């Protein structure tokens, strides 16, 4: 098996991982130590922080290793950030279906994303190792992304119902659960039995949905670079900013009616780029320009449509922060 090539030294890997854990500890241990509903202003501030950190890191890569790795990171980050927006559609449905109060949504997303970091790291290294050994897999990944993009376009108006899927049905049969909340706890006790609260069920759905989205997003970055450090860091920065992006956009997702069209275009483009890698060679700058143009066009078209479409019925939104909690009966 060929060795995996990366521009990062062991010290850079250790430093980045330490930075991630420090930011997570700061997030949960200081800024969100007390459960509260995340306001639009707070979400906007945290989104700006995460984007600024990602761009600062991008600048360091550019300065230290040149424009090639810098452009690859920026393209990979844009791909991951745009595809992660599709997660938000599902998260809104999960929280609404399970009636998760806004005051507890951050906790569910925090632990869901923490587990996603570990899972994605394993998937990235496995993917890089497989591509290094079996070059033909790049054509398989490319075809998979093209088919996924086509499927996303065809099903762009399909309503998600993850709470009724096989995972949740199986979990409810296997894991004793209760529809009642017990504050921030994932488990509670009723009549001497330890039961899962709706927060744990929501966490399971969030983690499962991230696994499914990772199957699309990680191969998409392989169309840009196979350096595991660039793939990993661009993935992690996009994931770390997902929680704040959720609270920033959750109430306005219906305004982006053409976003899934843009995302499907991105998947088809990167899939074709991957499948034709031995025939057509596109520079990172061209790839970045095409992806930005496709996403930008879909966002602008969505906003124009929303502006000229009169409202009809109540807007879909995440559960209200003031939703009354029903405490569990404990023994």
Image (cartoon, rainbow, N blue to C red):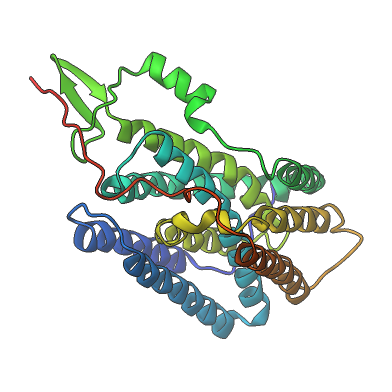
For residue 144, side relative to residue 107 (left or right): right
Can you say whether 260 is above or below 208 in the image? below
Give the residue at the far bottom of this rendering.
63
From the viewer's side, name the closer residue of 113 and 149.
149
Question: In which quadrant of the rendered view does residue 4 lie?
Answer: bottom right
Residue 330: x, y in percent?
10, 23
**Residue 320 in view in this figure:** yes
For residue 226, side relative to residue 167 (left or right): right
From the viewer's side, name the closer residue of 57 and 40.
40
From the viewer's side, name the closer residue of 303 and 26.
303
Can you say whether 64 is above or below 275 in the image? below
Can you say whether 114 is above or below 189 in the image? below
Residue beneath the point at 78% across and 74% down:
286
**Residue 6 in view in this figure:** no
Residue 160: x, y in percent?
57, 36
Residue 188: x, y in percent?
19, 27
Give the residue at the far right of this rendering.
279
Counting the numbered discs, the total is 0
Q: Give the quadrant of the C terminus.
A: top left
Residue beneath the point at 43% across and 49% down:
317
Residue beneath the point at 68% across and 63% down:
225
Can you say whether 296 is above or below 214 in the image? below
Residue beneath the point at 51% across and 77% down:
55
Residue 222: x, y in percent?
69, 56
């Amino acid at each position: 098996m060929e060795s995996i090539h990366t521009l990062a030294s062991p010290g850079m890997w250790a430093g980045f991982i330490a930075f991630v854990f420090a930011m997570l500890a700061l997030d949960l241990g200081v800024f969100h130590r007390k459960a509260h509903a995340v306001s639009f202003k707070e979400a906007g501030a945290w989104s700006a922080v995460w984007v600024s950190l990602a761009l600062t890191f991008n600048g360091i890569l550019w300065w230290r290793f040149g424009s090639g790795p810098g452009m690859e990171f920026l393209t990979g980050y844009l791909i991951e950030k745009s595809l992660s927006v599709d997660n938000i559609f599902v998260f809104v449905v999960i929280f609404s279906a399970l009636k998760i109060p806004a005051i507890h949504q951050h906790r569910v997303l925090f632990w869901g994303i923490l587990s996603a970091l570990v899972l994605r790291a394993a998937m990235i290294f496995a993917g890089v190792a497989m591509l290094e050994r079996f070059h033909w897999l790049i054509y398989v990944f490319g075809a998979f992304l093209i088919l996924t993009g086509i499927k996303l376009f065809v099903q762009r108006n399909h309503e998600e119902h993850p709470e009724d899927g096989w995972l949740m049905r199986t979990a409810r049969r296997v894991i004793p659960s209760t529809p009642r909340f017990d504050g921030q706890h994932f488990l509670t006790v009723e009549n001497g039995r330890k039961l899962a609260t709706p927060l744990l069920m929501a966490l399971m759905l969030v983690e499962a949905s991230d696994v499914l989205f990772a199957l699309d997003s990680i191969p998409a970055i392989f169309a840009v670079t196979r350096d595991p450090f660039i793939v990993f860091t661009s993935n992690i920065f996009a994931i770390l900013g997902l929680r704040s992006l959720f609270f920033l956009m959750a109430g306005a997702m219906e305004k982006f009616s053409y976003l899934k069209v843009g995302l499907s275009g991105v998947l088809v483009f990167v899939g074709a780029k991957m499948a034709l890698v031995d025939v057509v060679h596109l520079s990172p700058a061209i790839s970045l320009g095409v992806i930005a143009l496709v996403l930008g066009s879909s966002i602008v078209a969505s906003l124009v449509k929303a502006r000229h479409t009169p409202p009809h019925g109540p807007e879909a939104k995440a559960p209200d922060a003031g939703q009354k909690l029903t405490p569990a009966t404990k023994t």
